[in-house]
Image (cartoon, rainbow, N blue to C red):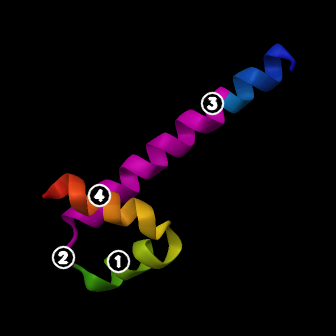
Amino acid sequence: MSIELAGDLLLSKKRIEQLEKCLRSAWQKTDDEEIKNLIEENFMREEIEKWQNDNS
């Protein structure tokens, strides 16, 4: 694997992790059911369940 490709993969992973944190924060903080439903419909159900368990 080239150094450039490895660097691109690492950046992509970091971006995905940042997006997951943003989604988690939005899901936890909003009282808007429409937003919660959109996040739940478009994100892995297992992640939502993990977030709920972390919140308990």
Observer-side mark, 3 or 4, equals: 4
Q: Which residue is mark 2?
A: 31
Of the image marks 3 and 2, the number of the one nearer the N terminus: 3
Q: Quadrant of the N terminus?
A: top right
Question: What secondary structure do most residues of the magenta stretch adopt?
Answer: helix
Whether residues under marks 3 and 2 lie with C-beta atoms below 8 angstroms apart, the answer is no
The span from disc 1 to disc 2 (Cα, nearest Å) is 8 Å
In this rendering, which labeled residue sits more in front, label 4 or label 1? 4
Labelled pair 1, 2 in contact (Cβ < 8 Å)? no
Circle 4 packing at 10 Å, graded few (<14), some (14-19), many (20+), is: some
Three-letter code, disc 2: Asp
At mark 1, the secondary structure is: helix
In the displayed structure, 43 sits above or below 4; it is below
Q: Are marks 4 and 1 in contact (CB under 8 Å)?
A: no
Residue 35: which numbered mark, if any? 1
Question: Image quarter for residue 28?
Answer: bottom left
Gap between marks 3 and 4 measured at Cα: 24 Å
At mark 3, the secondary structure is helix
Q: Which residue is mark 4?
A: 51
- Residue sitting at x 45%, y 42%: 18
Q: Earlier in the sequence, mark 4 or mark 2?
A: 2
Q: Which mark sits nearer the N-terminus, 3 or 4?
A: 3
